[in-house]
Image: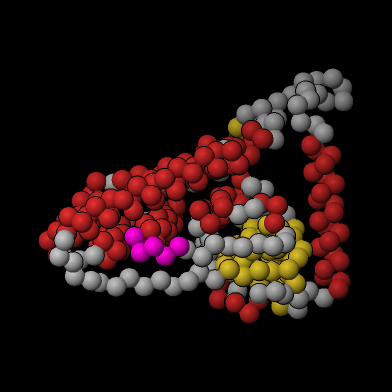
Amino acid sequence: MERLLGKGVYRGIAVGKLQYFRHEAGTVEKRAVTDTEEEIRRFRQALQKSIADLEQLYEKALKEVGETDAQIFQIHRMMLEDAEFTGAVEKAIREDHVNAEYAVKAASEVMQQAFAAMDDDYLQNRSADVKEVFGNLIAHLSGKQKTEICLEQPVILAADDLSPSETMKLDKSKILAFITAQGSSNSHTAILARSMNIPAVVAIGDALRMDCDGKMAVVDGESGEVFLEPDTATQQKYIEEQATQAKAAQELAKLRGLENVTSDGRKIRIYANVGNLSDVQTALQNDAGGIGLFRSE
């Protein structure tokens, strides 16, 4: 048995086979172009396709996780439509006679570095968003579709990290838990996992490897522990804990929509404590009467 430790970002227990998703490392070659206006037309066409993709993801997210968390795809669209970005790409094509793929890569790297250098942890994590958004645009330009995550049965999904679009395209019924080598409590893997009510552990580091693929695993989304090839006693302990949590959730679900009244007949209001906007959606789903404490730190 091997114990991995990361940061638990959504509580819950998962027991099952681990499937590791490996991102393909793409390369962008620099090519000289003579017909710059045709290259700009090609860039604009790919840009519209990328925007259409984000609109579809936004609509899907609206239905599955609500408006608050769906907004990330509108933010991604704003990145693509940013006049400074599109202007930099078209300027590079016209003046340097480079292909659109290379111009997009160069302009996106400037934006990515700007986010990564920010002091705020949340904004630092948006540098990964920049990489994803413009990576999809480059995929449209090159005609090479990004590898999709294929799930044939319920699994614990592991990866170096998962982008918002990758997470949103998944079949929730086949995800027992998310575990990632990178990420933080502000990463969109964490935010969407909370919205989807799926146990998640992030920031495990290099201990999460490709050779973990196919192994039996136990995930504790509260403690941040992941056990690979757990012994019988450990596996049984968490299966029992999982059953206890499921029973408690069923009992609590019966109280939704009912008046909050004490045994002596006194009406009370039950408020939820929240730390970010995604917690508000959870509070609404669980019938909270309002917000009791907002953690602003």
Q: Nearer the viewer, residue 260 or 258?
A: 258
Q: For residue 112, which quarter of the picture?
A: bottom left
Q: Position of residue 216 (x, y in %)?
A: 75, 72
- Residue 265 inside the magenta-drawn segment: no
Q: Is residue 12 left or right of residue 162?
A: right
Tell me: residue 146, above or below residue 167.
below
Q: Is residue 178 visible?
A: yes
Residue at 63% x, 60% y is 178
Q: Is residue 164 left or right of residue 37?
A: right
Q: Nearer the viewer, residue 53 or 112?
A: 53
Q: Position of residue 117 (x, y in %)?
A: 33, 60
Tell me: residue 92, above or below residue 265.
below
**Magenta residues?**
141-145
Q: Nearer the viewer, residue 209 or 26?
A: 26
Q: Is residue 240 left or right of residue 48?
A: right
- Tally the numbered discs: 0
Q: Is residue 131 visible?
A: no
- Quadrant housing the N terminus: bottom right
Q: Position of residue 30 (x, y in %)?
A: 25, 72
Q: For residue 170, which quarter of the picture?
A: bottom right
